[in-house]
Image (cartoon, helix red, strand yellow):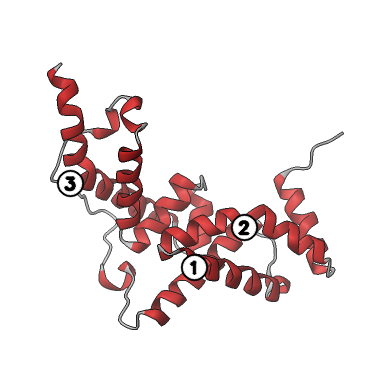
């Protein structure tokens, strides 16, 4: 039996949704809901708000399904709707909220050098296995400035390609690359001191 490709699966699911098949809507939520929730939770940092974003994402998606032409994958389209929903909710909840886009003039060729140079990326894998270290990493990711965080989550945690991330956030490939580089350097600087201290006992042995 021939296995349906992801693209064909999307087209088939989309056709069923267009035809008013309610079970197709449920399948879409089952297939993509967890991924959308993870993104929403990273952006909102609150479970209740993240659940609201997920609900709003699928409601908006199904209302606008006729405008979706299938040039990107359904998941990329949903990520874009979720991102916009999260940003709208943040601005509504916090009237003075500004994303990094509005407070930072990005220079594509700008070089960013972290103040801490300890290369924690080269620590033994076992050093990342403890609950304490995982929590440090999760907290650091939650603290990344919002727009950088959205790129980092989609590329590094959700596994989207650079192009898919650009499509989801409606930005250029260069912007995605710049923000991903900044997010990685931001994490490196934030975590360097902690991992240097973690590695110190091992280095003394």
> Which is more N-terminal, label 3 or label 1?
1
Residue of label 2 = 33
Judge left or right: residue 158 versus residue 139: right
Neighbor class of circle 2 (other Cα within 10 Å; few <14, some 14-19, many 20+) is some
Mark sitting earlier along the chain (2/3):
2
**Camera sees residue 175:** no
Q: Is residue 45 left or right of residue 16?
A: left
- Residue 143 drawn at (x, y percent): 30, 57
Quote the CA–CA distance across marks 1 and 3.
Answer: 37 Å
Give the distance between the C-alpha atoms of the residues marked 2 and 1, in whole angstroms.
15 Å
**Identity of the residue drawn at 28% across and 63% down:** 106
The mark lying in front, picked from 2 and 1, is 1
Left or right for 200, reference 168: left
Residue 15 coordinates in the image, percent (x, y): 81, 62
Q: Earlier in the sequence, mark 2 or mark 1?
A: 2
* Up/down of 54 relative to 204, above or below: below
Give the labeled residue for mark 1: 48
Q: Residues within 10 Å of mark 3 (few under 14, many from 20)?
A: few
- Determine the residue positioned at 20% across, 28% down: 199
| Residue 60 x, y percent position in the rendering | 63, 74
Residues at circles 2 and 3 in contact by the CB criterion of under 8 Å = no
Q: Secondary structure at mark 2?
A: helix
The residue tagged 3 is 113
Residue 90 position by quadrant: bottom left
């Amino acid at each position: 039996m021939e296995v349906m490709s992801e693209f064909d699966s999307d087209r088939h699911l989309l056709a069923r949704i267009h035809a008013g098949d309610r079970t197709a809507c449920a399948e879409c939520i089952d297939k993509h809901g967890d991924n959308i929730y993870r993104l929403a939770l990273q952006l909102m940092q609150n479970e209740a708000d993240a659940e609201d974003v997920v609900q709003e994402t699928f409601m908006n998606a199904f209302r606008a399904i006729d405008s979706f032409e299938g040039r990107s994958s359904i998941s990329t389209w949903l990520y874009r709707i979720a991102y916009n929903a999260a940003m709208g909710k943040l601005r509504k909840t916090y009237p003075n909220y500004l994303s990094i886009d509005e407070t930072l003039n990005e220079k594509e060729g700008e070089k960013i050098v972290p103040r801490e140079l300890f290369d924690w990326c080269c620590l033994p894998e076992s050093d990342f296995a403890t609950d304490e270290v995982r929590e440090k990493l999760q907290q650091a990711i939650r603290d990344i400035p919002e727009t950088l965080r959205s790129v980092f989550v989609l590329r590094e945690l959700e596994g989207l390609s650079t192009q898919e991330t650009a499509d989801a956030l409606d930005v250029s490939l260069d912007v995605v690359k710049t923000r991903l580089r900044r997010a990685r350097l931001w994490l490196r600087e934030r975590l360097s001191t902690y991992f240097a201290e973690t590695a110190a006992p091992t280095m003394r042995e």
